[in-house]
Amino acid sequence: MIRARLTTSQDSTNAPSPQGVRAGFTVVELLIALVIGLTLLSMAGQALSPVREASALRSSDYAIQYLVSRARATAIERRETVRHRIDPVGDTAWIQAGTDQVTRFDFDAELGADVVAGHTVTVCMTARGTGDPTCSQPTPAVIGLKVAEATRYVTILPSGQVITP
């Protein structure tokens, strides 16, 4: 016949423990785990970089489209000509109605995007919601949006239409 002895929690607490043995991790084990974690994190960051760039470029496109639409709506609301300007030096765009600055957008601060253009681009909207050719540039304005190594070009027609790729 086989007899087994069952140990209870009282038995295990009374059992002698070896001297100098501690539960937990050593500093070396923690450092190794930290190095492995940081290596995996950096690899994931490099893999997601193109996705982040594409997202920033797409958001920059949407920002330009929004600002042109907002300029048109503001011109209709105020019943006056409104200017939408894009400054490549400061990487900013704003809508100006008379002396009031209605909206301002900073591409660099908001999205990390650089605006690439030869000069400040101005598109004017009349109170009827159409482009004003006497105030706007007579030719389409091509604006480059650059994030890291990726570049995307947006064309704004004198009529206020935005053409994106």
Image (cartoon, grey):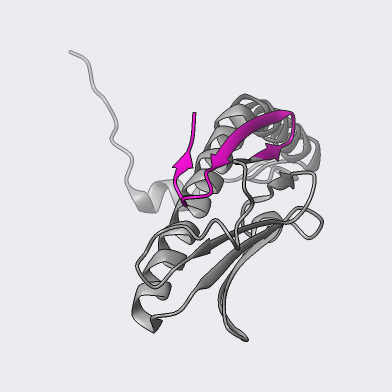
Q: Residue at x 67, y 25 (%)?
A: 43
Whether the magenta-drawn stretch holds residue 91 is answered as: no
Residue 138 spot, x, y in % from top left? 62, 48
Q: As displayed, is residue 17 above or below residue 68?
A: above
Q: Which residues are magenta?
A: 143-165
Q: Residue at x 38, y 53 (%)?
A: 10
Q: From the viewer's perspective, is 3 left or right of 156?
A: left
Q: As displayed, is residue 12 above or below residue 83?
A: above
Dominant secondary structure, magenta: strand
Q: Residue lying furthest front in this view?
A: 134
Q: Residue at x 57, y 38 (%)?
A: 154
Q: Residue lying furthest left in this view?
A: 1
Residue 69 spot, x, y in % from top left? 41, 59
Q: As displayed, is residue 85 above or below residue 63?
A: below
Whether the magenta-drawn stretch holds residue 146 is answered as: yes
Q: Quadrant of the N terminus?
A: top left
Q: Residue lying furthest bottom in this view?
A: 99
Residue 83 spot, x, y in % from top left? 57, 68
Q: Which of 22/84 is in front?
A: 84
